[in-house]
Image (spheres, rainbow, N blue to C red):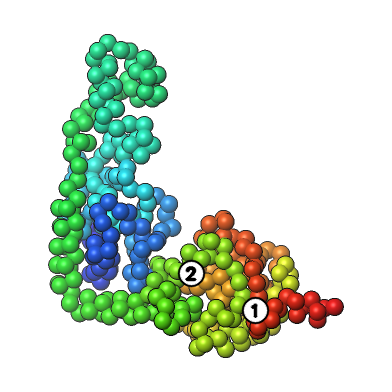
């Protein structure tokens, strides 16, 4: 496809993109937003939500690629990607929520989203003008800017609203997208097989919080390798150091990690007492990760994983006024989290069967 060639993407990149769309077709409906940051599996590497206005795929705008994979190529008359007013996510992958148009189409969709204009309102504005009402009078009635009303009534903007009233045939778009995806996958059988194996492996992947016999914390990972089940708890402000949260196979490793941390009261820094690198600028904690090839991580990252939830490749930061290598989870932040999740209250600390804070107070006394 031309759009993929213009973006400099390889056949494998094309295949990964098609597989992502196919997963969306299998799991979500035409009216629902397929938010890449929420639904895309971490196997589909290359997607990026760093831009607030649109989704990025391999450093290219993903919107023309979404339209191309549904069999719609750009034309000279319609060379602008338009996102429908019903779409609530700028990182949406749903082909039904985009179409090729012009600047006028973009303005119309924005006006619809802000609930200022609709096809029905445009018709009523023109009927009122033809009946003898002035543009100023109409603007007051409908609480719209005078210049907007004047341009609509004179035919300068939205001169023909017939094309706006013609809706996208969603069934046809989804059917065409499905055919294109299947064709791409069948034309690259070897690469598709590798991708399918990788996808199934990812579905079996578990985060440290998974317990045998439970469905959560397994095969549900986002673009950064974060466990989406954990992210829900983190956003709610969950923060607890309790070795009993983990399955028996993880218990001793978790316990061993916290034994290398000088656990103090809730407000104090908890210095890392384990291994550090030669220049002492980075701590080293032995802890395997589902999305990292290395068996060691920085101590404050592991402290965040074991107290709040598994966040994959997201960077964990220590507070500005903290001691070096602080592992107090209440002092650790991830910048991508919402504000309400940035300053959690540490609920409890249980490294044994007793309360470690009471033990600390007694030792201090």
Label number found at residue 230:
2
Where is residue 177 drawn, in percent x and y? 19, 59
Give the camera-side residue of 253 and 84. 253
Determine the residue positioned at 31% across, 39% down. Answer: 109
Determine the residue positioned at 28% across, 60% down. Answer: 28
Q: In the figure, is residue 27 to the left or right of 350?
A: left
Where is residue 156 drawn, in percent x and y? 26, 24
Quadrant, the C terminus:
bottom right
* Location of residue 191 (image quadrant): bottom left
Determine the residue positioned at 30% across, 76% down. Answer: 199
- Tell me the residue that label 1 is attached to: 350
* Location of residue 316 (image quadrant): bottom right
Residue 164, above or below 203: above
Asked if residue 154 shows in the view, the reply is: no
Determine the residue positioned at 14% across, 72% down. Answer: 187
Label number found at residue 32:
none
Give the camera-side residue of 133 and 323. 133
* SS at badge 2: helix
How busy is the neighbourhood of tag 2: few (under 14 within 10 Å), some, or many (20 plus)?
many
Where is residue 261 drawn, in percent x and y? 67, 81
* SS at badge 1: strand
């Amino acid at each position: 496809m031309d759009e993929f060639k213009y973006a400099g993407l390889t056949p494998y990149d094309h295949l990964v993109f098609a597989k992502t769309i196919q997963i969306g077709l299998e799991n979500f409906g035409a009216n629902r937003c397929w938010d890449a940051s929420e639904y895309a599996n971490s196997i589909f590497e290359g997607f990026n939500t760093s831009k607030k206005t649109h989704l990025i795929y391999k450093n290219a705008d993903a919107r023309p690629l979404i339209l191309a994979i549904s069999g719609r190529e750009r034309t000279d008359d319609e060379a602008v990607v338009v996102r429908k007013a019903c779409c609530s996510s700028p990182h949406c992958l749903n082909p039904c929520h985009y179409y090729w148009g012009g600047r006028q189409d973009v303005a119309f969709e924005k006006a619809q989203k802000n609930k200022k204009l609709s096809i029905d309102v445009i018709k009523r504005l023109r009927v009122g003008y033809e009946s003898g009402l002035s543009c100023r009078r109409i603007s007051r009635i409908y609480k719209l800017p005078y210049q907007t009303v004047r341009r609509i009534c004179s035919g300068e903007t939205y001169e023909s609203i017939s094309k706006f009233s013609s809706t996208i045939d969603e069934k046809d778009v989804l059917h065409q997208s499905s055919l294109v995806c299947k064709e791409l996958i069948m034309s690259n059988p070897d690469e598709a097989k590798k991708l399918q194996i990788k996808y199934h492996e990812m579905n079996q992947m578990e985060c440290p919080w998974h317990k045998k016999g439970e469905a959560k914390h397994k095969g549900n990972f986002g673009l950064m390798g974060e466990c989406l089940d954990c992210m829900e708890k983190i956003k709610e402000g969950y923060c607890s150091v309790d070795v009993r949260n983990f399955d028996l196979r993880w218990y001793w490793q978790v316990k061993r990690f916290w034994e290398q941390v000088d656990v103090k009261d809730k407000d104090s820094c908890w210095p890392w007492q384990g291994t550090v690198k030669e220049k002492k600028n980075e701590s080293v904690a032995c802890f395997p990760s589902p999305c990292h090839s290395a068996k060691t991580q920085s101590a404050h990252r592991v402290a965040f994983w074991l107290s709040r939830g598994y966040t994959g490749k997201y960077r964990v930061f220590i507070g500005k006024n903290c001691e070096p290598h602080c592992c107090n989870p209440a002092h650790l932040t991830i910048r991508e989290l919402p504000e309400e999740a940035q300053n959690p209250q540490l609920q409890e600390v249980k490294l044994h069967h007793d309360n470690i804070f009471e033990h600390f107070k007694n030792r201090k006394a």
